[in-house]
Image (cartoon, rainbow, N blue to C red):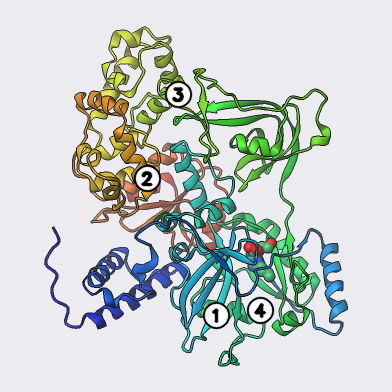
Amino acid sequence: MGQEIPPTPNPQQRVQDLQKMLQEASYAYYVLDAPNMEDSVYDRLYRELQDLEGQYPELITPDSPTQRVGEKPASQFVSVRHHIPLYSLENAFSSDDMQTWQERWQKVMPDANAEYVCELKIDGSAIALTYEHGILVRGATRGDGIAGEDITQNVKAIRSIPLRLQLDNPPPRLEIRGEALLPLGSFEQINRSRSQQGEPLFANPRNAAAGTLRQLDSRIVARRKLDFFAYTLHIEDVPGNLNLSFPTQQWQSLEFLHQIGFKVNPHRQLCRDLSAVQAFYDRWSTERHNLPYMTDGMVVKINSLTLQTELGFTHKFPRWAIAWKYPAEEVPTVVNAVTVQVGRTGALTPVAELSPVQLAGTTVSRATLHNSDRIAELDLHVGDTAIVRKAGEIIPEVVRILADLRPAGAVRFQMPTHCPECNSPVVKPVDEAVTRCVNPTCPAIVRGALEHWGSRDALDINGIGEKLVRQLVEANLVQSVADLYDLTLEQLLGLERMGQKSAEKLLAAIALSKEKNWARVLYGLGIRHVGSSNAQLLAEHFPSLQALAESTPEAIASVYGIGAEIAQSVHQWFQSSDNQALLQRLQATGLQFQGAIAPAATKGNLALAGKTFVITGTLPTLKRDEAKALIQQAGGKVTDSVSKKTDYVVVGEEAGSKLQKAQALGITCISEPELLQLL
Ligand code: IVH
């Protein structure tokens, strides 16, 4: 159990010191992007603070770094009225629109000086933060602009949002607004794990950010790595607030926001007139593609806050600001058919089969339709002309239908009532958008389970791929992963195009899987919401399958990083008698269902300890996953996007914007052989 904690001479002082050190380290890391403390030191101090606060709960303050993540998930969000309405912005799509806007406001204030601040329009979710006497007391979503939802606990889980302002005489109340966003790297990571777990993908980073902010469990928010850029400051008109050192210009406000502890987007410009605004717009219309987050235009604001107040608002928008949007890359094409794929978890995903079109640099011939709710919303008929775009500039999706172009006799697409793979009736729970096949022997589900079992992060069985799995299932040799361990050489030799050597190799690879650790086995079971990192966390905490199977949802959720939903899903999985039978068979094969698992983040004296890598382009011999695994085994970290924190960029052929970015930041770029040498 816990080790003896030496008595602290002055716990109050120590708690304050720890809070301050951790706050400063977190600010340096998350806001300034310039870490000043080793992770291991941070972790140690954090634990010390947690322990002390545990002993002396009266010393916990609302801005303590330990208060970022809530212990218990919320049951629902409460609606809150905004002190000042959150307006949205009028859109401009051309320089003519910008000219019209300028003429319009100049009519109201003819003699005013038109100095503008240009900011990038970050494609995330607007939030309002209230600080009372310098302490964060509330975070709220925009909602309808008049009232939003209280998401304070989630907002605290965004590490770049300060819990206390760096301001000497903070006013009684201050409101800061800005954009919560999900960087592209995190967006891709979330979707990768959602796809591994057979969950519907987020269409774009904006939806993912908005969805994350509305998570009831703030621990999930903390894991998803949201970020925040502040862009406006509202000081309430209370006596004593009339402090002349507060900004009088938007340009100064941004600087001020930065000084009091916020991250402010560095790409901004003060422009004397619309031609300077145009130049900024032109520059970012291409450069925005190199940013690690999405922007969909820029926001142009009148610099003088006095002039802003004088101009005021229309019934919908401020007169003093406008969003100049970049045209989205959207193209029309014909939906020739809709196919329905059945995933590993039985989820049915409708896919539009398109006449191929060029879109944002690639040929697109299929686009996801997400689920039946989305299809109903689109009113999709086969033969329709659809507008397709790359959501988040990555995944092609159907945006809308041009109903006027619908051919006569076109039939509305309906989700099948029976599974296209096994013909058993499908189910659609009322509170879910997903339609599922629930037949555990459905070949698509069986195939999915087998492929997942053999996949690299699970049991890593060389040779188990889509083709072989299909053969094994069709030949009726395998109905569950346990059957893999009963396969014989003779059976395999009976398969088409299977030679003696390949069959022997496959059997050896299957046998080798029995040596894989228990975290991999757990991941391989394909329990909903248990991706490889969750499996790792659970296996570190529960030394055996039995310990996990016998624990309560509460005990599972007490593992740091595991939310209530995951815990429930794990617990439920073990209750099923089919799963129990499967486990019994698997245990009899000699697979590892127990054993100590070293924490993933152990650094020790490994060659690449503490180093962060980004891999870009195609490497000459290693697959990306292989390079990643090698780096991780040596204690390094692999991230998706290049930042100042990146130590090395491993460059292969056809490297793109990441290489440019690395060069711009002066980060060391190395080739595969150089990486191998480092290893
Ligand atoms: S100012 C009263 N500045 O764009 C004006 N908005 O289309 C308040 N946005 O709801 C908004 N970046 O979510 C402003 N630098 C920026 C922004 C920005 C993104 C979003 C914000 C707003 C939406 C309006």
Farthest left residue? 4
**Disc 3 within 8 angstroms of ligand 1 (CB):** no
Measuring 47% from the left and 60% from the top, which residue is drawn there? 667
Q: Position of residue 247 (x, y in %)?
A: 62, 85
Element type where label 4 sits in the image: helix
Q: CA distance from mark 4 to mark 2?
A: 44 Å
Camera-nearest label, 4 or 3: 4
Can residue 533 be seen here? The reply is: no
Element type where label 3 sits in the image: helix
Q: CA distance from mark 4 to mark 3?
A: 56 Å
Can residue 471 be seen here? The reply is: yes
43 or 413: nearer the viewer: 413
Q: CA distance from mark 2 to mark 1?
A: 37 Å
Q: CA distance from mark 1 to mark 4?
A: 16 Å
Element type where label 1 sits in the image: strand
Along the polypeptide, which appears first: circle 1 or circle 3? Answer: 1
Along the polypeptide, which appears first: circle 4 or circle 2? Answer: 4
Q: Position of residue 220 (x, y in %)?
A: 42, 54
Position of residue 166 relative to residue 334, above or below, is below
* Other residues around mark 3 within 10 Å, as few (<14) / some (14–19) / many (≥20): few
Q: Which residue is mark 1?
A: 174
Q: Does 145 sit left or right of 523 as displayed?
A: right
Q: Assess whether mark 3 and mark 4 are in contact (beta carbons under 8 angstroms).
A: no
Q: Which residue is mark 2?
A: 566
Q: Which residue is mark 4?
A: 250
